[in-house]
Amino acid sequence: MSYLELRNVTKVFTGGMFRKTTTVAVDNFSLEVDVESPFIRALVGESGSGKTTIALMMLGFITPTRGEMLYKGRNFQKLPRKERQIFRREVQAIFQDPFGVYNPFYKVDHVFDVPIAKMHLARSTAERQALKEEVLRAVGLRPEETLGRYPHQLSGGQRQRITIARALLMRPKFIIADEPVSMVDASLRATILESLIRLNRELRIPILYITHDLTTAYHLCDNIIILYLGSIVESGNVEHVIKNPKHPYTQLLVGSIPWPDPSRRWGEGQVPIVVDREASGTDNQCKFAPRCPFVMPICRESRPPLFQLNNDRSVACYLYKDKPVAESSSYLF
């Protein structure tokens, strides 16, 4: 039994006052988390691919339209209040905006004091103070230079590391990091990523790292899932996927990386961008077919399943239809 699982989840958003529109943000997605195998797995895709929607479902903030989220084998929506409170403590999030998570009227101590009080993590003022100092030092911050200040008095990197410290405060079993370095200076990204690596290696906490940045995913993660319009198109060992991408969309993403080689053209030898997003995602064709230079008649007739190329690589593309279909579409941490 997995610790946390998204099982064949689909999330559809509807909107519009006079003319109703529907958007399929996530389409038949599955993922399992086993806290006994603490990998760092990347969930990668362009804007609108469904990454953050998946994170919000795994955090229990939104409910799948179809499918279910399981916590320790039980449907999360049917859990009693006490078990949900345990879940809130064990599954922590680090969000993109290092300023938006703070109330500007409170000092940064507030983000620690509230969970300590609600979760009964300390029995005295001295114990509470020691706990805050411990987690701040764990992410490379000096308590004497951090506590007692307002959010605007700290840098973006400091604020983001405080959010990591707050997650660490709860002694989590699983962390979801949604674009944690996209809004900080490049000079601070290495420090923040190093904090995540330390949590994973020293405390053995599995991390789902959500990003559009293949470079940080390559350096940080063990495995990678590539999303396109809410569906998995490729998954496997991060080094194999980045260095030898198999799906045309993954090739497009890798080709967009600016390499430090002046003799190499940006995107040379990769898939050109042929955008027709309005035609993408229809039920009777591969979602990437309107942009794919290798499109075949079968691609417009049915969606490809995930084909198993080897033990650690699955690709949803008919270019590999001679390979066996993957037994499961669920990826395990």
Image (tube, grey):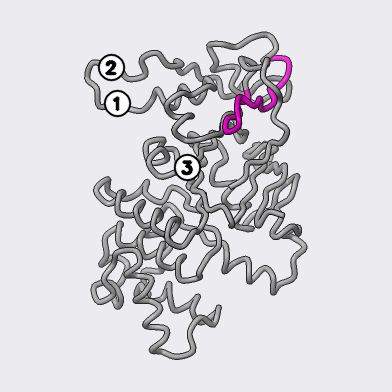
Q: Give the range drawn in magenta.
A: 300-316
Contact between marks 2 and 3 (CB within 8 A): the answer is: no
Q: Is disc 1 surrounded by few (<14), some (14 to 19) or many (20+) residues within 10 Å?
A: few
Q: In the image, is residue 244 above or below residue 140?
A: above
Looking at the rendered structure, the kind of residue marked 3 is Asp
Residue 286 lies in quadrant: top right
The image quarter in which residue 98 lies = bottom left
Q: What residue type is labelled 2?
A: Arg
Check disc 3 and report the residue beneath it: 222
Identify the residue position indicated by label 2 in the image.
264
Residue 314 on the magenta segment:
yes
Say whether disc 2 or disc 3 marks the residue closer to the N-terminus.
3
Calculate the distance from the C-alpha at mark 2 to the C-alpha at mark 3: 27 Å
Label 2: how many Cα within 10 Å (few below 14, some 14–19, many 20+): few
Please, is residue 159 above or below residue 299 in the view?
below
- Mark 1 or mark 2: whose residue is earlier in sequence: 1
Residue depicted at 46% across the width and 62% down the height? 203
Counting every numbered tag in the picture gives 3
Find disc 1 in the rendering and name its residue: 259
On screen, residue 267 above or below 260: above
Nearer mark to the viewer, of 3 and 1:
3
Say left or right for 44 vs 303: left
Residue 324 is situated, as x and y percent measured from the top left of the image, at: 70, 23
